[in-house]
Image (cartoon, rainbow, N blue to C red):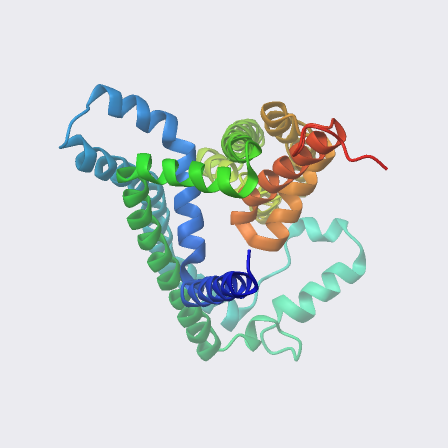
């Protein structure tokens, strides 16, 4: 290669790097939507291939991706709209109750007499007397409620836009699935060589195993806690159990629902039952998030327990819910590359000599 050709190659690489950086900066607001679409497409790809083999044809190339995209939208939107409808139905009553509590205070519950004296004093100073300087509810002004409502509405609108672009991207990924897979295989072969396809398959297996772990473990946690809620007489045990199952897809997310159920028990005057819910919930949470979920994910990817846990928690801390899939996939590929290197199965087929 001559000097001029070398300089031209470096210039092309710099130009490509600049274009990639510019493209990422332009689409930065939609990267989560693109990532979610890829994750969903990877998860449902086996089902999509089976359906496509059954209904093959030019019409199915468009109608089948559209039908699957619509099904994904319904799976997400139907429970969400039901929850929003329930919340709106209760919003008026909650607002009236809050206004009454702000004007009249909340009387100390009877079970508070059996606790430490300072607990009743704190309740009396901050919750019971609306004229006390430290009255908590009196500090919450209507303008604050309106501002928080606007922030929540803006956040919901942003997420709705992201979800819409996710569905749009998912449709095109399914419609052009074969061409995209072929291009990815050729590109990975040029960049990584023979190991490129193995890296891709390991990442795909990790994403699918993570989804299985999240869904199965979430359903299990929700079912167990539904039984606990029912036995202890918690209001709306099935609804709380369903919400617990949804929250359990996030590591330690079910703890929020444990706190809600415990608060309901305290409001009913049953602090002992509240404690039982919290303790039993934490036990279920520890077993599910530290044993069952890593075992499901690690079993499919040959990923050690520690790396599964680090991938899940680290990914969630770095990328949010999206990191639940990115984290384990990254760890799975990294461990696979390390094993190839340690076993001398990397490039060249031999371990480097020292």
In this picture, residue 53 sits left or right of residue 353:
left
In the image, what residue occupies the spot 66% across and 35% down?
Answer: 337
In the image, what residue occupies the spot 55% across and 36% down?
Answer: 193
How many labels were placed on the picture? 0
Q: Nearer the viewer, residue 236 or 47?
A: 47
Q: Is residue 272 visible?
A: no
The residue positioned farthest toward the front in the image shown: 2
Q: Nearer the viewer, residue 280 or 122?
A: 280
- Name the spot of residue 246 as percent of width and height, x first: 48, 39
Which quadrant does the C terminus fall into? top right
Is 135 located above or below residue 44 in the figure? below
In the image, what residue occupies the spot 63% across and 52% down?
Answer: 317
- Name the spot of residue 81 as percent of width and height, x first: 32, 48
The residue positioned farthest toward the right in the image shown: 354
Is 153 located above or below residue 302 in the figure? below
Is 275 located above or below residue 105 in the figure? above
- Name the spot of residue 102 as percent of width and height, x first: 51, 71
In this picture, residue 337 sits left or right of residue 186:
right
Q: Nearer the viewer, residue 27 or 113?
A: 27
The image quarter in which residue 331 lies: top right
The residue positioned farthest toward the top in the image shown: 54
In this picture, residue 331 sits left or right of residue 211:
right
Which quadrant does the N terminus fall into? bottom right
Q: Is residue 136 visible?
A: yes
- Name the spot of residue 210 as percent of width and height, x first: 54, 34
Q: Nearer the viewer, residue 38 or 214?
A: 38
The residue positioned farthest toward the left in the image shown: 59
């Amino acid at each position: 290669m001559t000097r001029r050709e070398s300089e031209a190659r470096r210039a092309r690489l710099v130009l490509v790097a600049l274009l990639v950086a510019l493209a990422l900066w332009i689409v930065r607001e939609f990267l989560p939507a693109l990532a979610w679409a890829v994750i969903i497409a990877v998860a449902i790809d086996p089902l999509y291939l089976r359906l496509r083999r059954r209904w093959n044809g030019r019409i199915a190339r468009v109608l089948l991706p559209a039908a699957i995209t619509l099904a994904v939208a319904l799976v997400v939107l139907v429970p969400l709209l039901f929850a929003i409808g329930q919340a709106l139905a209760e919003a008026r009553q909650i607002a009236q109750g809050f206004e009454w509590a702000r004007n009249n205070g909340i009387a100390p519950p009877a079970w508070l007499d059996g606790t430490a004296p300072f607990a009743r004093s704190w309740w009396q100073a901050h919750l019971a007397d609306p004229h006390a300087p430290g009255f908590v509810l009196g500090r919450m002004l209507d303008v604050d409620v309106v501002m928080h409502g606007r922030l929540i509405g803006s956040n919901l609108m942003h997420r709705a836009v992201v979800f819409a672009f996710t569905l749009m991207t998912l449709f095109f990924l399914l419609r052009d699935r074969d061409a995209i897979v072929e291009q990815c295989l050729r590109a990975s072969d040029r960049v990584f060589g023979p190991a490129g396809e193995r890296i891709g398959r390991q990442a795909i297996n990790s994403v699918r195993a993570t989804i299985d772990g999240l869904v199965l473990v979430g359903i299990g946690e929700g079912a167990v806690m539904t039984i606990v809620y029912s036995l202890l007489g918690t209001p709306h045990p099935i609804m709380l159990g369903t919400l617990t199952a949804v929250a359990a897809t996030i590591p330690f997310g079910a703890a929020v629902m444990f706190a809600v159920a415990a608060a309901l028990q305290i409001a009913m005057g049953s602090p002992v039952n509240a404690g039982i819910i919290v303790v039993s919930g934490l036990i279920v949470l520890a077993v599910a998030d530290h044993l069952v979920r890593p075992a499901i994910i690690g079993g499919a990817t040959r990923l050690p327990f520690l790396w599964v846990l680090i991938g899940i928690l680290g990914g969630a801390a770095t990328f949010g819910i999206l990191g639940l899939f990115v984290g384990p996939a990254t760890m799975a590929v990294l461990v696979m590359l390390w094993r190839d290197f340690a076993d001398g199965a990397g490039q060249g087929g031999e371990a480097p000599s020292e």
